[in-house]
Amino acid sequence: MDIEQKQAELIDHFVNQASTLKASAIWPLIIEATSHPSLFAFSEILSTPTVSELEGTENSLCLDVLRLFAHGTWSDYKSNAGRLPQLVPDQVLKLKQLTVLTLAEMNKVLPYDQLMQELDVANVRELEDFLINECMYVGIVRGKLDQLRRCFEVQFAAGRDLRPGQLGNMLETLSNWLATSDNLLVSIQEKIKWADSTSELDKKHQKDVEDRVEEVKKSLFLKVS
């Protein structure tokens, strides 16, 4: 089973579970979802009425934790650890995996020093083991470990949940790209027309030259005769 199909099945499972629970009983489900080794998308769970209705209630921290796993990073958690529940080890691992995905969205060459700082990793050996065993082997990223340059070259990274407002930015970027593509296509078509026109002129010029050569040959032949 590929990672996308597995994700879809897990999302359906947790969404269905969340839909049947009361707000007061949602926390264990959130821990289970954010600890699951094969789940890396949480926006659908966030959208369930049981979860979204936690906003402003005594259980709103549950919502904050789920939002952290949908959009945040390990650094975000450390910055807010004083007000958030303590994460279990599997949640810590998951959030660090998600942090790698966020970094890979922004840059396809990730320096080891940056990764070690963002992931709280003590040395290069520990970092490379994490990237190999917990990221590449899991299938959420593919890339090359460059020990000489001390960086991770990202070739593929799974996408994370869209952050609020991110969809609009993506649509604007796509619209700009399409406009640029249209302008480029027009420019290419104009160059093709110019090349065709130039080619026709060259052919006409060549024919004129050949005709003149023939006329000169005929003239010389007549004079010789």
Image (cartoon, rainbow, N blue to C red):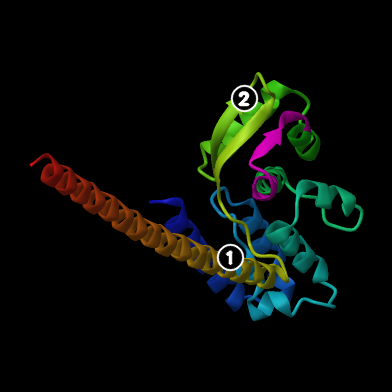
Res 2 visible: yes
Numbered range of the magenta stretch: 101-113
Comparing labels 2 and 1, the label whose residue is closer to the camera: 1
Label 2: few (<14), some (14–19) or many (≥20) C-alpha neighbours in 10 Å? some
In this picture, residue 220 sits left or right of residue 27: left
Q: Is residue 149 above or below residue 103?
A: above
**Magenta stretch: dominant secondary structure:** helix
- CA gap, disc 2 and disc 1: 35 Å
Residue 118: x, y in percent? Answer: 78, 40
Q: Residue at x 20, y 51 (%)?
A: 215
Q: Amino acid at mark 2?
A: Asp
Q: Nearer the viewer, residue 81 or 198?
A: 198
Residue shown at 81% from the left, 71% from the top: 60
> In this rendering, would 140 be left or right of 100?
left
Q: Identify the residue position indicated by label 2 in the image.
A: 146
The residue carrying mark 1 is 180
Helix, strand or loop at disc 2?
strand
Furthest residue in direction left, as rendered: 225
Magenta-span inclusion, residue 218: no
Asked if the residue under mark 1 is in contact with the one under mark 2, i.e. CB atoms within 8 Å, the reply is no
- N-terminal of the pair, mark 2 or mark 1, is 2
Query: Splitting the image into 4 quarters, where does residue 193 fall?
Result: bottom left
**Secondary structure beneath disc 1?**
helix
Relative side of 71 to 207, left or right = right
* Residue for point 68% across, 61% down: 70
The amino acid pointed to by label 1 is Thr
Q: Position of residue 72 (x, y in %)?
A: 75, 56
**Quadrant of the image for the C terminus?**
top left
Which percent across, then down, holds residue 200? 33, 60
Reply above or below: 53 against 11.
below
- Residue at image position (69%, 36%) is 110
